[in-house]
Amino acid sequence: MTTPDPSPLLEVEKLCKHFTIFSQGLMRKPVGLVRAVDDVSFTLRRGETLGLVGESGSGKTTAVRAILRAITPTSGSVRFNIDGKSIDLAKLPDKQLKPLRTRMQMIFQDPFASLNPRMTVGEIVSEPLLIHRQAKGKEMTDRVAEILLKVGLKPEHRHRYPHAFSGGQRQRIGIARALIMRPELVVADEAVSALDVSVQAQVINLLKDLQAEFGLTYIFVAHDLSVVRHLCDRVAVMYGGRVVEIGDTEPLFTTPEHPYTRALLSAIPSIDPDERMNFGLHGEVADPAHLPPGCAFHPRCPECFHPCKSERPELLDRPEDRRVACHLYTHSPESAATARS
Ligand code: SF4
């Protein structure tokens, strides 16, 4: 019997992805910097689902693209712990990265745009096997039939084209394509947001079933917090390219500590008046090309106090496995109390 690996599957440390802005014209000079992802750190345990939430422009999608090396990080490390080795994806040359791509897969938001309309379902789902030379002939056909059944489709569907399927079925095709490589890590980027609510629930339940069956680890990027609460074990909240709060889902939803998390959660409709929180989210999301000094959330924060406009808060440990980046928890209780009053 093999002993389960106790190490986290993924350790993200000080991950940054910056884009340089150049001037127009022939002499293109650097004139600015977009800090799309800035100093992001978290760990991902084996078999868990981590929700990554925040408004559009908060850096969620860029962060997962940098983690999966769809784009090259500017700095930081992404340690992928598999087969008894700890491999830093951030610094790995492309050649060594290619075999690892089978171990981490992505499910996209728009199931129609992400599927080639000129390919049959069988060709779409089997393509990764061909690219990575993992199977061909009857073995490939059998694996396609097996994974189509696992995602709730029929083996004979492999002869049809994507347009013949509903939105929910197309997302199942996308899931089959991602899972046929038997990955450890699956990143779902807004994977159910384009679907009707009833179909969303079916796809979420499918993702849960597949996770239990294959021991998958998920990063679930979403703006729908109700879905995140239902699906995720832990949640990381991003703002201005940084993680501002991370913790277990239920404690984070019932006692959010960062003012931005409280504001986000206040936008969820609740039928229980006691569960409604009185925090509003006003103003525009921080522009990553012009982040405010200090805490990036300070222009919108109802609890902003003296250090917030000049000192950047670090992500620090809080009780119950929570981490929060906010001066309210690092400055004297008097300062915080004054700010809250
Ligand atoms: Fe608000 Fe200050 Fe905390 Fe930022 S550091 S969230 S401005 S209280």
Image (cartoon, helix red, strand yellow):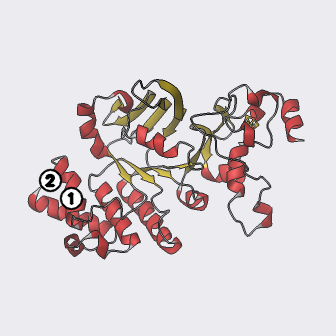
Judge by depth and name the residue closer to the eye, 287 or 258: 287
- Local SS, label 2: loop
- Residue 321, label in figure: none
Q: Name the residue furthest front.
A: 25
Judge by depth and name the residue closer to the eye, 205 or 242: 242
Q: For the residue marked with disc 1, what is the amino acid?
A: Ser
Mark 1 vs mark 2, foreground winner is 1
- Residue 135, label in figure: 2
- In the image, what residue occupies the spot 32% across and 55% down? 178
Q: Where is residue 8 in the image (x, y as percent from the top left)?
A: 45, 38
Query: In the figure, 197 relative to 182: above or below?
Result: below
- Tell me which numbered mark, 1 or 2, is placed earlier along the sequence: 1
**Residue 330 can be seen in this image:** no
Question: Which quarter of the frame holds ligand 1?
Answer: top right
Q: Name the residue furthest left.
A: 137
Q: Where is residue 145 in the image (x, y as percent from the top left)?
A: 21, 67
- In the image, what residue occupies the spot 40% across and 70% down? 168
